[in-house]
């Protein structure tokens, strides 16, 4: 398969732009934040609220998107992408607004700390702590503590899956569903075919993947920790049902396929779609790519069904 024509046109329009790993980190972060515009229209929601909540390494910023005035809404915790080093509440604002409207969920975006200032496992600590706080304070937010999903884009989706594992092992919080878009960092096995086939991929290359690894870890041995490489976890049974979207032209595609395989092997229900002709993070480009809209609809529909009623 070749690149979808809309993807090829998007790439051609950005020809010559340096990759984020080729820029000073501050510029790369600003570049990713500005990329929110590629998600198309900034949809209106009933209310958007920014606040800080306590965390193990200091306050954590969250942004709450309310799609309706209903109370006890299902909750979708959203963790942004950006290779554990970039991304913010602003980089995925349009996606979060659209996800809230299409899923009917109270979407709560979490601004976890970034590497290299805060290396593994601090971002995971923030993500778990924020999710536990959201569950404990769900009623105050207007949400239902019995109907919580977690996930996100790229490394954020992976963080969401890791939070599910930690919640299972620690007995809380209760998470009903997980949603992953192009999960990256599920392991560091670069011998898989997608790493070679898409090494010079669009918007994410293997050079960028290796750069991210260098920013994220303080010790190579950390890559064997299941919190860093969830595909190495010995047992994935008991995790919540999942929807996983992967893309044909994504160097980390096969990591996502392995996670899907492991979940199914463990008896966890999984809805998986591999989008032909697509690239890493394609839903974030839904303003220019029709399959980005379709992917977001698939995520939203799966979340809505996964949180359809209280357990």
Image (spheres, grey):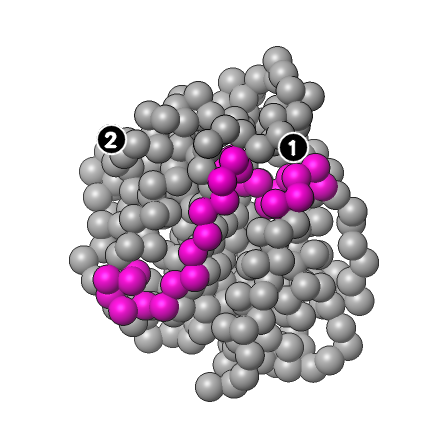
Q: Is residue 73 visible?
A: yes
Q: Is residue 266 magenta?
A: yes
Going from N to C along the chain, the mark reached first, 2 or 1, is 1
Question: Looking at this rendering, what residue extends furthest in the bottom direction?
Answer: 311
Question: Looking at this rendering, what residue extends furthest in the top direction?
Answer: 16
- The magenta-colored residue range is 263-292
Residue 133 or residue 15, whichever sits in front: 15
Residue 130 or residue 106, whichever sits in front: 106
Locate residue 264 relative to residue 207 in the image: left or right: left
Using the image, tell me which numbered label, if any, was put on residue 6: 1
Q: CA distance from mark 2 to mark 1?
A: 29 Å
Above or below residue 299? Residue 10 is above
Label 1 crowding class (10 Å Cα cut-off): few <14, some 14-19, many 20+? some
Q: Is residue 132 visible?
A: no
Label 2 crowding class (10 Å Cα cut-off): few <14, some 14-19, many 20+? few
Residue 69 or residue 251, whichever sits in front: 251
Using the image, tell me which numbered label, if any, was put on residue 33: none
Q: Give the residue drawn at x 80%, y 67%.
A: 46
Q: Give the residue drawn at x 64%, y 20%.
A: 12
Above or below residue 116? Residue 60 is below
Locate residue 276 relative to residue 232 in the image: left or right: right
Q: Give the residue drawn at x 69%, y 82%.
A: 71
Determine whether the residue tagged by mark 1 lies in a helix, strand or loop: helix
Residue 162 location (% of width, % of height): 36, 56
Residue 37 location (% of width, % of height): 73, 38
Determine whether the residue tagged by mark 2 lies in a helix, strand or loop: loop
Residue 81 location (% of width, % of height): 52, 43
Above or below residue 141? Residue 96 is above
Of badges 2 and 1, the one in the foreground is 1
Using the image, tell me which numbered label, if any, was put on residue 191: 2
Question: Looking at this rendering, what residue extends furthest in the left direction?
Answer: 234
Q: Give the residue drawn at x 40%, y 32%.
A: 251
């Amino acid at each position: 398969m070749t690149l979808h024509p809309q993807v090829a046109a998007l790439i051609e329009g950005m020809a010559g732009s340096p990759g984020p790993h080729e820029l000073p980190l501050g510029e790369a972060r600003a570049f990713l934040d500005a990329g929110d515009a590629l998600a198309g229209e900034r949809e209106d929601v009933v209310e958007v609220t920014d606040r800080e909540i306590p965390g193990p390494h200091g306050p954590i910023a969250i942004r709450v998107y309310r799609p309706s005035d209903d109370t006890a809404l299902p909750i979708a915790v959203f963790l942004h992408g950006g290779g554990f080093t970039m991304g913010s509440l602003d980089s995925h604002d349009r996606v979060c607004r659209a996800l809230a409207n299409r899923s009917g969920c109270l979407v709560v975006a979490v601004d976890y700390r970034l590497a290299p200032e805060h290396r593994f496992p601090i971002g995971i600590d923030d993500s778990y702590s924020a999710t536990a706080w959201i569950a404990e304070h769900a009623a105050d937010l207007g949400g239902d503590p019995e109907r919580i999903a977690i996930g996100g884009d790229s490394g954020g989706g992976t963080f969401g899956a890791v939070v599910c594992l930690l919640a299972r092992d620690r007995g809380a919080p209760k998470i009903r569903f997980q949603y992953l878009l192009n999960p990256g960092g599920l392991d560091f096995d670069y011998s898989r075919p997608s790493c070679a086939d898409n090494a010079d991929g669009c918007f994410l290359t293997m050079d960028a993947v290796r750069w991210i690894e260098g920013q994220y870890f303080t010790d190579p041995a950390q890559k064997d920790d299941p919190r860093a490489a969830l595909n190495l976890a010995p047992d994935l049974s008991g995790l919540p049902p999942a929807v996983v979207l992967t893309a044909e032209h994504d160097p980390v595609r096969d990591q996502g396929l392995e996670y899907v395989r492991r979940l199914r092997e463990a008896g966890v229900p999984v809805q998986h779609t591999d989008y032909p002709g697509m690239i890493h993070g394609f839903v974030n480009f839904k303003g220019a790519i029709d399959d980005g809209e379709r992917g977001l609809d698939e995520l939203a529909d799966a979340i809505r069904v996964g949180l359809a009623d209280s357990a």
